[in-house]
Amino acid sequence: MSEAGGNVRVLLEQIAKELVDAPDQVEVTQIDGDSTVFELSVAESDIGKVIGRQGRVARAMRSLVSATGIRANRRYELEILE
């Protein structure tokens, strides 16, 4: 796991824990390859809070991940698992 990738994982985890009702069920896994994919899973009852109205929260989180990847000269992606 790269240093920047680990920081992104921690950032996503912190953001998601603040958004949901069950922070103990927040899990972020990192899959390295050509691009690094972060998979975010939360409790089934909290999925709407992570996605937000019309996907605004999810879009904002993806923008943060993408911007961090640009700074690290890597491609980062966020997948929200249902």
Image (tube, rainbow, N blue to C red):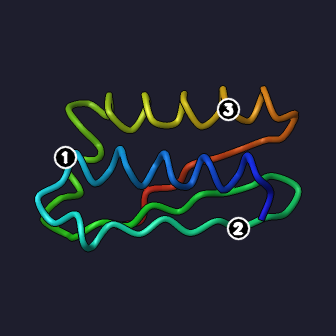
Q: Hey, what amino acid is under mark 1?
A: Lys
> Considering the numbered disc 3 on the image, is that residue within a helix, a strand or a loop?
helix
Which residue sits at x=88%, y=56%? Answer: 34
In the rendered image, residue 18, in percent from the top left (x then y), is placed at: 23, 46
Q: Secondary structure at mark 2?
A: strand
For label 3, the crowd category at 10 Å Cα-Cα, with few meaning under 14, some 14 to 19 and many 20 or more, is some
- Percent of width and height locating residue 52: 23, 37
Residue drawn at x 27%, y 54% is 17
Q: Is residue 74 left or right of residue 48?
A: right
Q: Position of residue 69 (x, y in %)?
A: 74, 36
Q: Which mark is residue 49?
A: 1
Dot 1: element = helix
The mark nearer the N terminus, 2 or 3, is 2
- The amino acid marked with disc number 2 is Ile
Q: Residue sitting at 29 percent across and 44 percent down?
A: 51
What distance separates the C-alpha of mark 2 from that of mark 3? 16 Å
Type of the residue with mark 3: Thr
Residue picked out by circle 3: 68
> Where does label 2 land, which residue?
31
In the rendered view, tell whether residue 20 sits above or below residue 57.
below
Q: CA distance from mark 3 to mark 1?
A: 23 Å
Left or right: residue 55 versus residue 49 is right
- Structural crowding at the residue carrying mark 2, measured as other residues with C-alpha within 10 Å and reported as few (<14), some (14–19) or many (≥20): some
Q: Indicate which label's residue lies in the foreground, 3 or 1.
A: 3
Quick one: label 1 or label 2, which is nearer the N terminus? 2
